[in-house]
């Protein structure tokens, strides 16, 4: 009978699904041990490895493998070997044995328990072991040898813990106390005994020191005397040898000083030469550097000047081109305006020419009239001048005298004007004639004017003035020169 292929694939799929349902793979972490039990007689232990578990047929349990802290305290006072009740506080670090046998033992007692639950289960057993060890020790041993005490607790508790699959890592005694204060008194007794022993030892030591110091002082004194004697002898010998050595040393020192001085002079000379050479070399370098700096500065200045010149040249060219263009435009505008003005002026000049022609005709006629009038006026003035010249010629010096007499009042007025302008004046005169002297200057000034006139013209104004007096008219008591007589005759209109 043949099986259908589709049916075969369905059967295989069902088998695979069944296997995945009934078979489960698990992996244990390092801090836990997985215990698979149910089918086999001995449970399977997985520590840090994986394995298969058949669901519903096998059970999976866990055991904690990490470190567990157990606090061990004596809840009641425990008597020591010397019958002193004490209270002890200790801490133990335990762990499940990291092998399959130890894990199987721990699984029987601590399966699926937390670290706190395991510590609570172990606390009673460890307390009992510690109480047994306390009963075997005295109070002094508990306080002075706590390491030995904790080691004994571990040795006592290890067999019991091994039966449970537990390994004790460490056990530390934290505190040991007693309610009667005996530990404190024991400490005080020890302190007093230690102080007593120390005082006795100190006294014995001081006594021994003093004895030894006395012996040492005696031996030291004897040795010092012997030493002083030997020292004196040796000092004497040393002084003699020192004197001889000093003499040799002084001689050698003098030679060395002379040689040193010569060497120092030579070195100083070399130093001076090197210093001068260094200064010369420094000066040369500074000169070279200065020249290079000057060249650099000159190049910079030349570049700046050239750059500025190029910029100025470009600006001038641009300005010149702009100015030329502007001037061209202005010239064209002016040319256009001039052409327009020329056209206007041509039209205006035609009208003006006609008007000027008419005005010229009128001006010509007027000018001819004015010229005729001017001609006639000039002829009249010339005739008048001829008449006046003939009159002056006729009168001769009398006319001149006439004019001088006419201006005489002005002369007197101008002479007196400076005096009239004086407001306040103080005159100091030894003869008491200050005011009269000031007023007397007026005739003096007039006489000086007459004298100047006489020197310039030959006319004596004093004679002319005397000619007009009553005495001159009645008695004819006057001497006149010919010029004065002619002037008077001219003014009076008759001869003498």
Image (tube, rainbow, N blue to C red):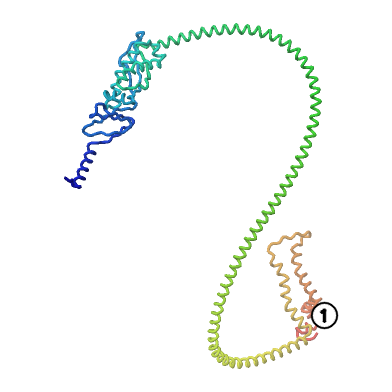
- Left or right of 296, for residue 3: left
Which corner quadrant of the image does residue 279 belong to?
top right
Judging depth in this view, the residue of 218 and 495 nearest the camera is 218
Judging depth in this view, the residue of 427 and 187 nearest the camera is 187
Judging depth in this view, the residue of 408 and 50 nearest the camera is 50
Task: Tell me: residue 280, above or below residue 494.
Answer: above
| Residue hosting label 1 | 480
Task: Tell me: residue 69, above or below residue 367.
Answer: above
Q: Residue 203: x percent and y percent?
A: 54, 7
Q: Residue 434: x percent and y percent?
A: 75, 62
Q: Residue 356: x percent and y percent?
A: 57, 90
- Left or right of 259, for residue 42: left
Identified at 74% across, 63% down, the residue is 435
Q: Quick one: which residue is furthest to the front in this view?
A: 1
Q: Which quadrant does the N terminus fall into? A: top left
- Left or right of 24, for residue 376: right
Judging depth in this view, the residue of 428 and 44 nearest the camera is 44
Task: Tell me: residue 87, above or below residue 16.
Answer: above
Q: Which quadrant does the C terminus fall into? A: bottom right
Which corner quadrant of the image does residue 295 belong to?
bottom right
Q: Residue 115: x percent and y percent?
A: 30, 26
Identified at 75% across, 12% down, the residue is 232
Task: Tell me: residue 215, above or below residue 263.
Answer: above
Mark 1 burial class by Cα count in 10 Å: few <14, some 14-19, many 20+? some
Identified at 63% across, 6% down, the residue is 215
């Amino acid at each position: 009978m043949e099986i259908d292929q589709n049916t075969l694939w369905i059967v295989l799929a069902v088998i695979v699904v069944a296997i995945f349902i009934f078979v489960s793979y698990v992996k244990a972490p390092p801090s836990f041990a997985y215990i698979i039990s149910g089918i086999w007689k001995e449970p399977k232990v997985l520590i840090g490895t994986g394995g298969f578990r058949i669901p519903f047929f096998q059970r999976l349990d866990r055991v904690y493998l990490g470190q567990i802290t157990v606090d061990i305290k004596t809840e009641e006072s425990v008597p020591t070997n010397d019958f002193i009740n004490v209270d002890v506080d200790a801490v133990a670090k335990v762990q499940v044995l990291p092998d399959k046998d130890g894990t199987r033992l721990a699984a029987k007692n601590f399966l699926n328990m937390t670290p706190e639950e395991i510590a609570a289960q172990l606390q009673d057993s460890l307390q009992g072991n510690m109480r047994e060890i306390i009963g075997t020790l005295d109070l002094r041993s508990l306080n002075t040898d706590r390491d030995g005490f904790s080691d004994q607790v571990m040795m006592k508790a290890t067999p019991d813990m091994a039966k449970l699959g537990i390994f004790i890592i460490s056990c530390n005694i934290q505190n040991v106390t007693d309610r009667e204060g005996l530990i404190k008194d024991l400490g005080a007794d020890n302190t007093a005994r230690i102080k007593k022993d120390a005082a006795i030892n100190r006294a014995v030591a001081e006594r021994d020191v003093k004895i030894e110091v006395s012996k040492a002082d005696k031996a030291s004194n004897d040795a010092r005397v012997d030493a002083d004697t030997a020292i004196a002898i040796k000092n004497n010998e040393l002084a003699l040898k020192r004197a001889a050595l000093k003499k040799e040393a002084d001689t050698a020192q003098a030679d060395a000083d002379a040689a040193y001085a010569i060497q120092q002079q030579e070195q100083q000379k070399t130093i001076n030469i090197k210093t001068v050479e260094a200064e010369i070399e420094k000066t040369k370098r500074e000169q070279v550097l200065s020249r290079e700096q000057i060249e650099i500065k000159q190049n910079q200045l030349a570049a700046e000047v050239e750059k500025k010149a190029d910029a100025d040249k470009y600006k001038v060219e641009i300005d010149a081109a702009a100015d030329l263009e502007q001037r061209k435009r202005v010239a064209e505008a002016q040319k256009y305006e001039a052409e327009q003005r020329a056209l206007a002026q041509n039209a205006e000049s035609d009208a003006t020419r006609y008007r000027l022609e008419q005005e010229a005709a009128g001006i010509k006629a007027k000018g001819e009239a004015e010229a005729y009038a001017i001609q006639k006026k000039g002829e009249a003035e010339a005739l008048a001048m001829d008449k006046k010249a003939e009159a002056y010629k006729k009168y001769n010096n009398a006319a001149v005298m006439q004019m001088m007499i006419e201006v005489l009042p002005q002369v007197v007025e101008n002479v007196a004007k400076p005096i009239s302008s004086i407001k306040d004046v103080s005159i100091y005169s030894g003869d008491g004639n200050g005011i009269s002297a000031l007023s007397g200057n007026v005739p003096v000034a007039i006489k000086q004017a007459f004298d100047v006139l006489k020197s310039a013209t030959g006319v004596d104004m004093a004679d002319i003035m005397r000619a007009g007096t009553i005495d001159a008219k009645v008695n004819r008591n006057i001497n006149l020169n010919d010029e004065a007589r002619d002037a008077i005759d001219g003014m009076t209109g008759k001869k003498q």
